[in-house]
Amino acid sequence: MSIAPAWYLALAAVLFSLGALGVLIRRNVLVMFMCIELMLNAANLTFVTFSRVLGDIGGQSLVFFVLVVAAAEVVVGLGIVVAIFRRRSTTAADDLHGMKG
Amino acid sequence: MTPLVAATIPDVVTFALCAAVVLSGGVGVVTSRNAVHAALSLVATLFGIAVLFIEQHAYFLAAVQVVVYAGAIVVLFLFVIMFLGVDRREDVEREPLKGQRPLALVFVAVSLGGVLALAAASNWVTGARKVAGSRTAGGHTDTYLLGKSIFTTYLWAFEITAALLVIAVVGAVVLARRPPSVHDAGEDPGTQGERR
């Protein structure tokens, strides 16, 4: 008998909140990306937990796809960060106010 | 409803240790001033999640988690941090948007409390079962079942992700390439070699 799923789900909820908090309070774009990874991992943990509880392999398949999409997202996101840094020499989100009225 | 603690001692210890590692890593990502430290904290969190996958008998996903996340994604993060040279300390005292942090804390606390209260007051699952086949059918391993599921039920989605990866790689190359027009326009050819 392993740990009850409630503990895993609570841990995932707390981890997701940490990631959301990081996206809201940090200004470095790279660290904001890492916080998005935290949120994706919390969702993955929830998927695997429900896969175990329901006895359904579909949850684990979905985690596989989340991993692929996360990899693609990081590649494109970091490409954008490099392109912005080349023009503006900054990675702080507050310095990108070119469209401010 | 199963009781909250009905596990063997090793299971409880493993879960408690991994939860501590995961949460301290998450706090490290959010609070560390140095971007490299944040990336290393992210590695701790990812390893903790991988061990929790093993604890839940998702062995293949645990391996993929370590290889893809800790191996590829974090290395990509570190590469960009070093490449851009932004590994100096960030000034976290400055707050350009007045009241952003207290508001963010309140918002996240309310959301988390709401989710936990809602989950504690209602059912965890709706009762839908085995959409994509059993997790332990016929005594096969999770790797076998996962592969079978991906290459039968989710084959279309799998092919689409292959296209997505190719598009992402091409897009990243196009984004990170130095545009030739910026180089040539209105610049003295003599100084071009020295500029980087």
Image (spheres, coloured by chain):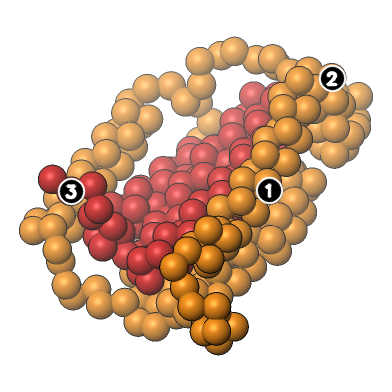
The residue carrying mark 1 is B169
Relative to A17, say whether B114 is above or below.
Answer: above
Q: Is residue B46 left or right of residue A33?
A: right
Q: Which chain is orange?
A: B
What distance separates the C-alpha of mark 3 from that of mark 2? 49 Å
User: Which is more toward the observer, B31 or B19?
Assistant: B31
Front: mark 1 or 3: 3
Mark 1 in CB contact with mark 3 (< 8 angstroms): no
Q: Hey, what amino acid is under mark 3? A: Lys
| Quadrant into which the C terminus of chain B falls | bottom right
Q: Is residue A73 left or right of residue B142?
A: left
Q: Position of residue B76 (x, y in %)?
A: 62, 64
What distance separates the C-alpha of mark 2 from that of mark 1? 26 Å
The residue carrying mark 2 is B152
Q: Is residue B178 visible?
A: yes
What distance separates the C-alpha of mark 1 from that of mark 3? 31 Å
Q: Residue at x 14, y 63 (%)?
A: B96
The residue carrying pointer 1 sits among few (fewer than 14), some (14 to 19) or many (20 or more) residues within 10 Å by Cα, namely some
Q: What is the number of the mark on residue A100?
A: 3
Q: Is residue B150 left or right of residue B121?
A: right
Q: Secondary structure at mark 2?
A: helix
User: Which is more toward the observer, B76 or B172?
Assistant: B172
Q: Position of residue B100 (x, y in %)?
A: 15, 55
